Image (spheres, grey):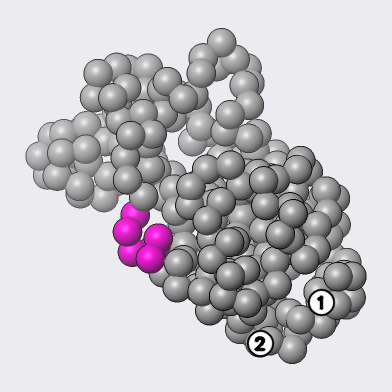
Amino acid sequence: MTERELAGAIRTNPGASVVFTGAGMSTDSGLPDFRSKDGLWKNVDPMELATASAMRGDYDRFHAFYSHRFEQMRDAHPNDGHRILSDWERRGFVDCIVTQNVDGLHAAAGSKKIYELHGSVGAVRCMTCGLPATQDDFIARTPCASCGGRLRPGVVLFGEGLPEDDLSASWDAAENAQVFLVLGSSLQVSPANQLPQIAKRAGALLAICNRDATPLDHIADYRTGDGIADFLKRLDALL
Ligand code: ZN
């Protein structure tokens, strides 16, 4: 289908577009893909440190790694793509955003209904009792105010389950979507690779905007490798 037809489907199905975003959504905001290696940590595999076992067995390195991530994210701001999605929600086109990102940039851009499948860096809590704390507390290694335990970021680590409420809400949203828009995810891992298929099976149009090919390109009704902000600006002009 053409971009004009895709925009028409978004416009004529108010509140029935579900947007799924991954790391590519935030690269325009200067955040490197989680798996890309930069600076201080270029010789370290994040897959080794962003784990529940590193948090319990190697807290010093775990803490240093996430402190560095926090500082990167602190300097990042929503880009035009985040702003357009927030505007679409306000105008009644978008039902919700399901995201793999933990950077909080959708919320910073003003989006309200967001399901964060991998948690959020902002949601620091105590490892032991779960009491919420701040990012500054985490970076300063301030002990939990209630039990004295160590603090952890509110992200889902490798080895941990996804948040069940957000997951089941995302499932429902995918089943009820008329348009399912994938932005900046390579759709390699579960449930990222399942949600678009659920939506498609339930009758939604599937559009994928991702720089690299994805395993679901063959079932997409629309597919582009263009930059996300540019793609959304074009669609926005057609709405
Ligand atoms: Zn505690």
Instruction: Say which mark, if any, is on residue 62.
Output: none
Query: Quick check: 170 above or below 133?
Result: below
Query: Quick check: 136 above or below 167?
Result: above
Whether residue 124 is visible: no
Instruction: Say which mark, if any, is on residue 14.
Output: 2
Which quadrant, please, contains the C terminus?
A: bottom right
Residue identified by numbered label 1: 7
Q: Say which element carries label 1.
A: helix
Q: Residue placed at 48% from the left, 47% from the top?
A: 190
x, y percent for residue 185:
64, 48
What's drawn in magenta, residue-wise?
Answer: 163-168
Q: Residue placed at 54% from the left, 52% from the top?
A: 192
Lateral position of residue 156 relative to residue 177, left or right = left
CA–CA distance in space, label 1 to label 2: 11 Å
Res 86 quadrant in image? bottom right
Question: How many dots with numbers?
Answer: 2
